[in-house]
Image: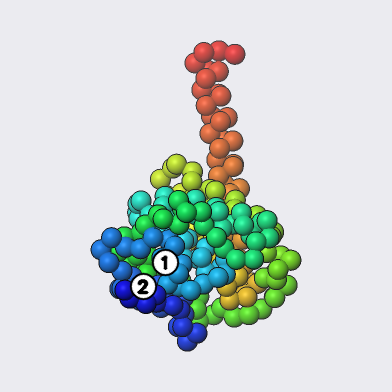
Amino acid sequence: MSMPMTAQTDRTLLQTIEILAEAAPEEGFSLREIFDRLDESAFGAGLFLLALPCCIPFLYGVPQVVALPMLALAFQMVIGREEPWLPAKLAARKIDRKGLTQMARGGRKWFGWIEAIIRPRLSVITGRRSERVIGAFLFLFCASILVPLPMTNTVPGMAVAVTAFGLMQKDGLAVIGGSILGICWVGALIAGAFLGLNVITHISTAVFGS
């Protein structure tokens, strides 16, 4: 039996995900196996990893696998849990090797730049006292990923990923940026829903009368 591959202190999270994808069998790994191999006990790393497939356009199937676990982790932040935990059914969900490879490539493509500019700053934003508030925002962003419409994963996925990366690296500016992106997206969804409802109401009135 092979030993778990753990993240090394001199290896970035993106590099670790790339190595994980290369080492994966064809059937992939369960979320629990992935978390164990990353050897991460922080919410930021877990949410970043799970958000990656949501950021990749036209990657179908995997976002639906990770959406509920993302909600579970965000909720745990809200209630003040110190370490992430997944229920057995969610932890058993698998991402196959193809999905992991796409996640690794997408992570490098979309977030490779952030490794060069992210750094600890505005520490009050990433402290324990702020984590519950950030968790509430992340919960909303993760919930919006479940909206059953095409192309609705990418923007909230980006928001979660940037915010989570900021949490992981103690970069309050990144957390603020990701949160603003997510809030704008949720606001756009709500506005779109109201607009759609008004259109339906007007059409119904025109066709059937008041």
When the figure is inspected, residue 141 is found, relative to residue 115, above or below; the finding is: above
**For marks 1 and 2 on the same chain, the one whose residue lies earlier in the sequence:** 2
Indicate the amino acid at tag 1.
Ile
The structure residue drawn at horizontal position 70% and vertical position 75%, both measured from the top left corner, is 123
Amino acid type indicated by mark 2: Leu
Chosen colour scheme? rainbow
Q: Secondary structure at mark 1?
A: helix
Mark 1 — residue?
Answer: 34
Which residue is at 54% across, 48% downward?
Answer: 143
Q: Is residue 131 left or right of residue 42?
A: right
CB under 8 Å between discs 1 and 2: yes
Can residue 192 be seen in this snapshot? yes
| Residue with the mark numbered 2 | 20
The relative height of residue 142 versus residue 107 in the rendered view (above or below) is above
Residue at horizontal 42 percent and vertical 72 percent from the top: 37
**Foreground residue, 168 or 155?**
168
